[in-house]
Image (tube, rainbow, N blue to C red):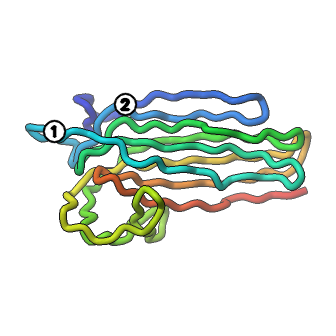
Amino acid sequence: MTVAGVAGELLKERIAGGPEEVQWELEQFKGIKHPNDVAPATVAPFRWAPTITIRDWERGMLMDCGADFDVKFQYNGTAISNVEITNVGFDDSIAWKLKVTAIITGDNAIYDNRAAVPVYVDGSLRPLLTADDTVASADMARQPCAALRIRVEFNFTQWPVGGAHKGIIDLVIFGDGTHARWGRWVQEDFL
């Protein structure tokens, strides 16, 4: 994969933060992902896609533990640039600890989203979504575009001893400003 002139790698940074009970490590993408990893002779201007919010992962009963994130990216109709994942709030708890990790990976396919066909995400077809998480309608003005994949893992542990719980959100963001999303619990262990 070629991104911003660098062969074989994505230009990423990692930011970390949070108190002891709720911590996060979030990758950021600072390059450009073109279809086929080939920059055209002239690159259309980029604009910010509407923010994708992640607000639905908590654990606990009386003392909830959770963290909220925003995902922002720029697109120009075919390419993606400047993916920013930021924490926008959290609830810590005496009884729970949370570690959140967000990883950005390349997607080598070229997507033709004109017909708004569902996208294959983590073994299943998922609807193509617009910024407000409504299902996208067909739009013949869309062009074939690049994509990046983002996996956000929420790892909860009960303290001082107890079960482990893991929730995952998979996002696929596209150079036409749309996205696909799927979230699920993959581990729920109790004493």
Image coordinates for residue 160, horizontal then vertical, percent: 91, 39
Identify the residue position indicated by label 2 in the image.
30
Q: Going 42% across and 54% down the picture, which residue do you hit?
A: 172
The numbered dot on residue 43 is: 1
Q: In the rendered image of this protein, does residue 71 appear above or below residue 132?
A: above
For marks 1 and 2, the one nearer the N-term is: 2
In the rendered image, which quarter is residue 91 located in? top right
Q: Which is in the foreground here, disc 1 or disc 2?
A: 1
Q: In the rendered image of this protein, does residue 33 appear above or below residue 189?
A: above
Image coordinates for residue 50, horizontal then vertical, percent: 41, 49
Question: The C terminus is located in which quarter?
Answer: bottom right
- Dot 2: within a 10 Å radius of its alpha carbon, few (fewer than 14), some, or many (20 or more) residues? some
In the rendered image, which quarter is residue 167 located in? bottom right
Mark 1: secondary structure: loop
Residue type at numbered disc 2: Lys
Residue type at numbered disc 1: Val
Q: Going 66% across and 39% down the picture, which residue do you hit?
A: 89
The answer to whether marks 1 and 2 mark residues whose Cβ atoms lie closer than 8 Å is no
Residue 63 falls left or right of residue 114: right
Image coordinates for residue 68, horizontal then vertical, percent: 63, 44
Image coordinates for residue 141, horizontal then vertical, percent: 18, 62
Residue 142 falls left or right of residue 24: left
Q: In the rendered image of this protein, does residue 145 appear above or below residue 121?
A: above
